Every structure is written in structure tokens, then in C-alpha cells.
Amino acid sequence: MNSFLTFVSGEGADSSPNWFDYFTLIITSLISIFSVLGGYKIARTIYKSEQNDKLLEDMMLQTTEVNLFKNSLSQLKTSVDKQVEALKRYDSERNFTIQFVQGLDTTIFNYIQIRHLYLDIGFSNSEKINRLNELIGLISSLQKFSLNLRDEFRAYMDKYSFHEQKRYQYRQLLYTKFFELYNERSVSVEVDENSGRKKFTFSTQDIFIKKYNDLINTVQNDQEVIFDGSLKSIDLLIVRFIVPLIHLSNEYVPEDIHAIQILEISNAVNTAHKDIENITNVHFTSVNTYLQLLENISGKIQEYSSIA
């Protein structure tokens, strides 16, 4: 009986946890805890590293775009100033020659993220942000500037050419039509033996052709109007020849068929001249509007750059 109890008691003692089992359990638990803590620390380190890399990448991108904006702004101002000078010269000379400056393309500004400019300025700097917004709005107005300016110039030249063809009839009044009347209304023609020039004689009652002839002689000897056989001033020709010819012809309408013809041509020339003056005034008013826009943009760029 005693030997049996001893055996049972010994078997039970061997199956109970001893100190080594507890030690192994503790070590295993600690290793698991440290593994978790180590994994968390490594993951946190990697996350912080990735965050720092992203932050650095964002800062580099922001710096790049800010520098791109400033450089593009400087180049745009150079082109704007050149176009300003070209438009001023065109307005002053009015010789149908206009220079279209390259470099007014603002496409590059569409690819710059404005939030990077805001971050560079600082959202608390409301004054500078407002100036930036105003500047970007003005830059946007340049997107089709060159195209619109070319269209304006082309439209003006088309209208000018149309009316100039009518105004060019002044040559008929000075030469061809006048010579036709000379031939038709003269009663005799003699050749001067000394000069070889033909001398036309008209009826004493033909007052119209006599006054017309006097008007022709006056304007052809007026060097402010015609110099060395070439027209010097179309404006003075209208004032000193066409308008007086209209009044003269009107005196002999309707009884003189030739006066009717001269009046019709004279009115056409005078009307065409007025139309040219009107379209020219409208055109250069538009040109000055473009000019003011460019001057405003140039000033705003200068203003913004001085505080950037």
C-alpha cells in the first residue's frame, strides 16, 4: 500500500510545473512583448521617415514652383515692356507697321499650383495674397492677348483698304476726270510754240470748268498738299481741294451733267476719308486699351516682385 502511494505521489509531482517551466513562460512572454514593441518602433520609425521624405519632397516641389513662378514672371515682364514700347511706337507713327513681341504666352502659369505660392507667402499675409490673386487675374487676361491684338490689326487693315479704294478716286478729280472735261468742254486747243504745252479755250459762259481749273492749279501749286508731283497730305487735300470742289459742283447741279458727276465722286472721296478717320480713331482707342492693360500688368509685376 505504501509503495503504491509513493508511486502515485511521485507521478503527480513530476506532472506539476516546476521553476524552469515558469522561467521559460516568462522569457517567451518577454520576447513576444519586446517583438511587438520592436515592430511598433520600427514601423513608427519607417512611418516618420516616409513622412519626413514626403515633407522634404513637398518643400522641394514648393521651392521649385515658387522659383519657376518668379522666373516666369520676370521673363513675362520683359516681354510685356517690349510690347508696350512697340504699341507706343505704332500709335505715334501710325505707319501700318506693328511689332508683335514673342514671349507673351502665359501657358506656363497654368501648370504652377497656386497653393505652393500661398504656402510660400504664408496664409496670414493677407495683403500679399490679395496682390498675388490680382496679379494672377491680370496674367490670365493675357492668354489670348497676342491673338486678339493680331485680329484687331487685321480687321483695321481690311476696313482701311476697303475705304481707301474709294478715297483713291481723288486722282480722278485731279487728273483723269478733269482731263475728260477739258477735252469735252473746250472750244479750241492751241499748242504753245515756246513751251509745247496745249492751251485749251473754253466758252466765256462755262464758269464751272474755269473755276474747276483754278482750283486744280491752286492745289497743284500748294507744296503742303502736293510736293514734287506726289501727294504730301491727304488731310490737306480733302480740306483745300475736295471740300471746295463739292461746294463748287453743288452750285451747278442739276443743270450741268458734269458737275453732277464731279459732285458724286467728290462726295464719295470725302465720305471715305471720314470713314477712314472713324475706323482709325476706333482702332487706336482699342490699341490704347491693350496698351493700358500691359502697362498695368507690368506695374503689378514690379510691385509684387519688390515685396516677394
Image: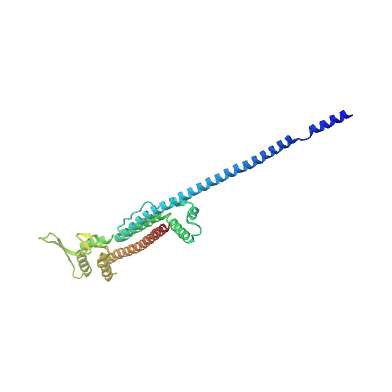
Quadrant housing the C terminus: bottom left
Residue 206 coordinates in the image, percent (x, y): 21, 69
**Which of 144 and 252 lies nearest the eye of the viewer?**
144
**Which of 259 and 107 lies nearest the eye of the viewer?**
107
Q: Is residue 107 visible?
A: no
79 with respect to 169 (left or right): right
Rendering quarter of residue 24:
top right
How many marks on residues?
Answer: 0
**Which of 87 and 29 lies nearest the eye of the viewer?**
29
202 with respect to 162 (left or right): left
Residue 59 coordinates in the image, percent (x, y): 49, 49
97 with respect to 123 (left or right): left
Identity of the residue furthest to the front in this view: 2
Rendering quarter of residue 156:
bottom left
Residue 116 in the image: above or below residue 30? below
**Which of 209 and 284 lies nearest the eye of the viewer?**
284
Rendering quarter of residue 154:
bottom left
267 with respect to 54 (left or right): left
Residue 152 coordinates in the image, percent (x, y): 38, 57
Q: Is residue 59 visible?
A: yes
Identity of the residue furthest to the left in this view: 194
Residue 199 in the image: above or below residue 17? below
